[in-house]
Image (cartoon, helix red, strand yellow):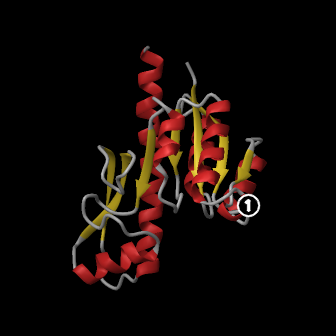
């Protein structure tokens, strides 16, 4: 059974592209069937459309606030009959009702650090905190997402990235992002294998 994947995005969509490429190349027995974004300006929407995947933005201001926007996005994901939802750079905390609307559909998130370290941070803030802490290693984590929790669900995949002398937040972010592209595919592959075994 080919896994039907919904992806929630906010920005450039490079993790979405990694999934689209892996599905196209046959590395994943999965298909991205729907993409929802928190911003109309998200370049990820164009990536989805270029791949022929239905995609739309759910701006809080146009949908009665955050909860209304997220509930509508959840309804679209349910209508697309997704087996898995991937938060790939989705930069808003999901309301509890989003999880309720999805029911038993698992939701996973990617975080640009080795959780539980540096939880609750996003963007360059994560990498600035890593550098300020003086650690020698960082990376990325794909984990389950649950209502009422931020960066605290069960860890599925971690990829490690060394912190190099002379790194700044931007150079470190670029290397961690490359690791994210691998980790997100690895995590979705776990669900695809489980679906195939049923």
- At horizontal 41% and vertical 64% (from top left) the residue drawn is 176
- At horizontal 38% and vertical 69% (from top left) the residue drawn is 121
Left or right of 20, for residue 143:
left
Q: What element carries label 1?
A: helix
Q: Quadrant of residue 43?
A: bottom right
Most foreground residue, 105 or 131: 105
Image quadrant holding the N terminus, namely top right
Residue 156: image x %, image y %?
Answer: 33, 42
- At horizontal 57% and vertical 23% (from top left) the residue drawn is 2
Residue 94: image x %, image y %?
Answer: 49, 53
| Total numbered labels placed on residues in the image | 1
* Residue extending farthest front: 64
Left or right of 95, for residue 55:
right
Residue 38 appears in the figure = yes
Q: In which quarter of the image is residue 12?
A: bottom right
Image quadrant holding the C terminus, namely top left
Residue beneath label 1, please? 62
Residue 4: image x %, image y %?
Answer: 59, 30
């Amino acid at each position: 059974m080919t896994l039907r994947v919904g992806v929630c995005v906010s920005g450039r969509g490079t993790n979405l592209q990694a999934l689209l490429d892996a599905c196209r190349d046959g590395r994943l027995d999965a298909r991205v069937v729907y993409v929802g974004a928190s911003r109309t300006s998200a370049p990820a929407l164009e990536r989805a459309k270029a791949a022929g995947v239905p995609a739309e933005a759910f701006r809080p201001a146009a949908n009665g606030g955050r909860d209304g926007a997220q509930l509508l996005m959840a309804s679209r994901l349910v209508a697309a009959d997704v087996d898995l939802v991937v938060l790939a750079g989705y930069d808003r905390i999901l309301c509890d009702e989003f999880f309720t609307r999805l029911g038993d559909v698992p939701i996973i998130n990617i975080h640009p650090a080795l959780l539980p370290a540096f939880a609750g941070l996003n963007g360059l803030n994560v990498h600035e905190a890593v550098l300020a802490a003086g650690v020698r290693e960082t990376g990325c984590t794909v984990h389950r997402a649950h209502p009422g929790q931020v960066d605290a669900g069960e860890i599925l995949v971690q990829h490690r990235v060394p912190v190099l002398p002379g790194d700044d937040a931007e150079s470190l972010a670029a290397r961690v992002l490359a690791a994210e592209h691998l980790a997100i595919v690895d995590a979705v592959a776990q669900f695809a294998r489980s679906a195939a075994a049923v």
